[in-house]
Image (cartoon, rainbow, N blue to C red):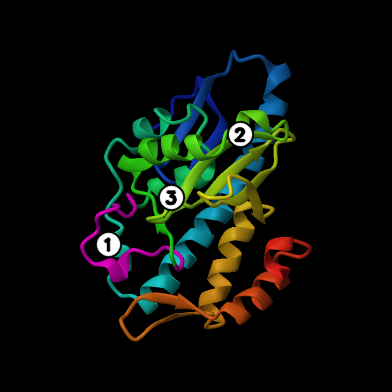
Amino acid sequence: MGELIEEQYALIGHVRFCEGILSLKPLSAKKSNTKRRKSRDEVYSTKCGMLNDLFDEFIVLSTKLRKEYLKSLGEKASNWEEMLRTIDTDMPYLFQVTYSKVSGTRRDIQKQELMDFIPGYRLIHISELNYEKKKLNKIYNYYNNDKIQKIIPYLTNYSSDFICYGKMTDGRDIVVSIMHDEQKLTLMHESIEKFFETICEFYKDNVYFLDTDGYLDYDVEREGEVGAKINENITYWIE
């Protein structure tokens, strides 16, 4: 950042931590909208900051178990913002935080032991997001669900099962899973933060481990126990 901001401009937007871009507006902007915009931006910045910290913690924990994992995710694409806008002009902060740091895992990754973001699922490479979203749309048509505003795939596997970001019509952000042969949504987490809090705890509590071949695996029983404590009253974790 480090650029001199001239006095005729005021910072009334938020600082996008991932790129350090300031959202600037002229002082002549309507004052009636400033308070509302400031409140919205403050909430957004807080959420982004929290998620940024959680994502960084996840990377540190996963790299302790698999030293080459972060490197395997690749550096961010130089045009990552433009690539995200082709999928959604109002891309959720989950994707902004993620792809401002890394590019993800390609479907044909050579080192299969580095494929998993969580056991069985890879972080979709940014260049494959459009392709995977089209596949998801064939499996589940969320337009018929009056409670869902949008669904965007985040993780996937070779069977075309997905773990997705979901936006509720009431504004809430959730994480859901969709199995290719069930064509229904299953709620996993009531917020993006809960998603990362859960998988970070799985590392800390040794729910995640490497099997004898070096692949990321998990303790099924412990996963349910730990997951249920963090995600209270979510059926997925207590079944």
Farthest residue toward the right?
A: 233
Query: Of residues 142 and 181, which is closer to you in this image?
Result: 181
- Residue 176 x, y percent position in the rendering: 61, 50
Farthest residue toward the bottom?
A: 212
Residue that numbered label 3 is attached to: 160
Total of numbered circles in the picture?
A: 3
Query: Of residues 28 and 99, which is closer to you in this image?
Result: 99
Would you place residue 48 above or below residue 67 in this image? above
Residue that numbered label 1 is attached to: 72
Alpha-carbon neighbours of circle 1 within 10 Å: few (<14), some, or many (≥20)? some
Task: Tell me if residue 104 is in the magenta stretch.
Answer: yes
Q: Residue at x 53, y 42 (%)?
A: 93
Tag 3, which secondary structure? loop
Farthest residue toward the left?
A: 110
Tag 1, which secondary structure? helix
Which of the marked residues, 2 or 1, is nearer the chain's N terminus? 1
Residues rendered magenta in the picture: 103-119
Alpha-carbon neighbours of circle 2 within 10 Å: few (<14), some, or many (≥20)? some
Residue that numbered label 2 is attached to: 142
Three-letter amino acid code at disc 2?
Tyr
